[in-house]
Image (cartoon, grey):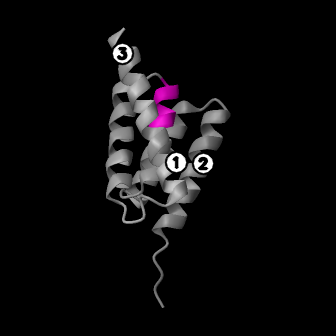
Amino acid sequence: GDFDTRLDASKSERDLMMRAYTSGQPSMALQHGRQALVFAPGSPLVHSDMCTLLSQLGQMDSAFNECSIALDLIRRDPLREEPARKKFRDSLEQWMSSTQAAARK
């Protein structure tokens, strides 16, 4: 039968993104991150990972956009009140609040 392997492919790209970033290859990390989004555009985790990467690269507007998308997706998740998802949502909200506050200074 046919299996949808996009989430697995996205996970592989996310892993490659992190490996590239930690080995000093930010452009390669961005490439893998973008590919992860192609495979799983509805994944709040992938958008959150891109948010983290972009913020570490100093691309705060893009990071904020990715975090906003992740937050929107997690807020629409039917299981959003599950403890791990709630903690994830809370951490996204906290990052966005602190980032907005820092930008105003």
Question: In terms of sequence position, does the residue under pointer 1 or pointer 3 come before the other?
Answer: 1
Is 96 covered by the magenta stretch? Answer: no
Q: Residues within 10 Å of mark 2 (few under 14, many from 20)?
A: some
Main structural element of the magenta stretch: helix, strand or loop?
Answer: helix
- Which residue: 37% across, 61% down? 77
Give whichever of 98, 33 is nearer the camera: 98
> On the image, which quarter does residue 11 sit in?
bottom right
Question: In terms of sequence position, does the residue under pointer 2 or pointer 3 come before the other?
Answer: 2
Q: Which residues are magenta?
A: 51-57
Q: Amino acid at mark 1?
A: Lys
- Which residue: 45% across, 33% down? 94
Structural distance between the alpha carbons of marks 1 and 3: 24 Å
Q: Amino acid at mark 3?
A: Ala
* Tag shown at residue 103: 3
Give whichever of 84, 5 is nearer the camera: 84
Residue 8, percent across and down?
54, 66
Structural distance between the alpha carbons of marks 2 and 1: 25 Å
Q: In the image, which is nearer the foreground, mark 1 or mark 3?
A: 1
Q: State which quarter of the image contains the C terminus.
A: top left
Q: Amino acid at mark 2?
A: Leu
* Tag shown at residue 16: 2
Q: Secondary structure at mark 2?
A: helix
